[in-house]
Each structure stands twice: as C-alpha cells, then as structure tokens.
Image (cartoon, rainbow, N blue to C red):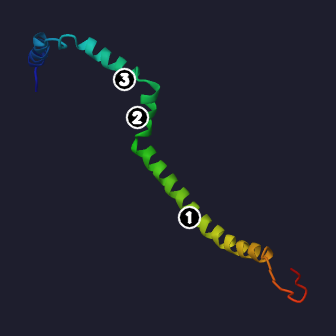
Amino acid sequence: MNTKSAIESQIETALSSLDNIVPAAAPNFFTGKVMSRLNEKSSGSFIDTWVSWLLRPQVAFAALCIIILLNVFAVVYNLDYSKGQDQSNIAISEAYTQNTSTSFYLENVKP
C-alpha cells in the first residue's frame, strides 16, 4: 500500500506540474478582428438578409413544390374548363346562327 510519504510526493509532483503552465496568448489584434467580423455579419442590409433567407435549400424546395402544385392544378382545371367551354360554344353558335334564305322574285322587276 501507499504510505503517507508516497501520497505526499505524488501530490507535490502534481502541484509542481502546475508551475510550468503558461497562459495561452491570443494573436495580435485578435479581439479587434473578431469584433469586426461580428459587426460585419450583423450589419447586413435588409435585402441581403432576405436574399440569404430565400436562398436556403428548404425555402427553395418549398417554393418549387408550390409552383409545381399550382401548375398541376392549372392543367387539371383547364382540361375540365375546355370540355365545358366546347359545349357552351356549340350551344352559343346554335343559338345565334343566321338563317339566310334568298329568294328572288323576278316577276315584278321594273327598271
């Protein structure tokens, strides 16, 4: 087993290793560079913020899905509408046909 003196020597060794520790030093102007980058990112214009938001893949994919869905609805509606439109065009053309009959009476022609 470890004796009291062995434990004390281990404690002294551990504490003496702390004497050689040197604090970490930041490079020159590190704080200034970090602060300028933070200010640069936060000072973006309103348009830049919206454009960066719109260019996200999730937003672009959602917009693409909406456009495709609207196109599908438009095609389906136009197919149904064109069938009904053809029938109504026929009905209108039958209602407004001009029946012209020409008859010439040649018996009472006076010059």
Q: Which mark is residue 108?
A: none
Q: Is disc 3 placed on a helix, strand or loop?
A: helix
Which one is nearer the viewer's eye here, 32 or 12? 32
**Residue in view at x 10 percent, y 27 percent:** 1
Horizontal side of residue 12 vs 53, given as left or right:
left
Q: Quadrant of residue 109?
A: bottom right
Which residue is denoted by mark 1 in the rendering?
75
Question: Earlier along the polypeptide chain: callout 2 or callout 1?
Answer: 2
**Residue indicated by mark 2:** 52
**On the image, numbered disc 3 is attached to which residue?**
41
**Labels 3 and 1: the sequence-earlier one:** 3
Query: On the image, which quarter does residue 83 sit in?
Result: bottom right
- Label 2 element class: helix
Check disc 3 and give the amino acid type: Lys
Q: Does residue 5 lie above or below 92 as drawn?
A: above
Question: Between disc 3 and disc 2, whose residue precedes?
Answer: 3
